[in-house]
Image (cartoon, rainbow, N blue to C red):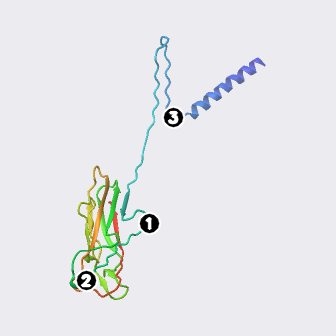
Amino acid sequence: MKHLTKTMVIILTMVMSMCWTSGVMAETSTVSVSVPPGGALNADARLNFRINIPKFIIFTVGTAGSTVDEVVFDPAVADVAVGNPGTAATTNGTVTVSLISNGGMVAIAEANDGGGSGLSDGGINNISYSQIITDDTGSPIPAPTLSDAGGNSENVTPTINGITVETGQWTYTYDNPATPPAPGTYTGQVTYTASVP
């Protein structure tokens, strides 16, 4: 009986030892030497770290979020009649523009929903987008010139090491054409797109 018990203890010890060895996944080191009492021992174990950062762009023109701001012009009769330039907007004439990206050079392009004809009164009359002037003076984010065909673009140079964190302002004015447009309310929507390769 003692012999059987001793055999079972030896087998159990071997099984536990095998389970312990097969279950270890991390790097482990063991140090065991004879040292005087109070002597130091060191055992090293290493970990590898990895951080995956995605390429991104955060671009805002006007109010942040899902709101689409409307820039409204109400030129005076005297300005419309003689084609005076530089009518300031009565609503949202200056908008805040912000750009955050880690993708290097950023291109900002303009497009619109006018089908190449400009702003529409809902009928046969149009006003060209080229009559809306964008002033980006002092802004680190240049504004593309508006056009009926769309496709004009400007490049934003990264601040440092391919990173861009910039905020600026764009101010819009309406340049009354020499020939007055027909009366009506002309509307259209411009889409600015920021992209990196």
Within 10 Å of the Cα at label 3, are there few (<14), some (14-19), or many (20+) other Cα atoms?
few
Mark 2 residue type: Val
At horizontal 24% and vertical 60% (from top left) the residue drawn is: 138
Q: Nearer the viewer, mark 2 or mark 3?
A: 2
Within 10 Å of the Cα at label 1, are there few (<14), some (14-19), or many (20+) other Cα atoms?
few
Please, is residue 140 above or below residue 161 in the view?
below
Residue that badge 3 annotates: 26
Mark 1 residue type: Ser
Q: Quadrant of the N terminus?
A: top right
- Sequence-earlier tag: 2 or 1: 1
Mark 3 residue type: Ala
The circle on residue 66 is: 1
Looking at the picture, how far across and down is residue 13, in whole percent?
65, 25
Distance of label 1 from label 3 (alpha carbons): 48 Å
Circles 2 and 3, Cβ within 8 Å, touching? The answer is no
Q: Quadrant of the C terminus?
A: bottom left
Q: Secondary structure at mark 2?
A: helix
Please, is residue 79 above or below residue 92 in the view?
below
- Sequence-earlier tag: 2 or 3: 3
Looking at the picture, how far across and down is residue 189, in whole percent?
36, 75
Distance of label 2 from label 3 (alpha carbons): 78 Å
Please, is residue 66 above or below residue 39 in the view?
below
The circle on residue 80 is: 2
Q: Residue furthest top?
A: 36
Q: Is residue 150 left or right of residue 50?
A: left
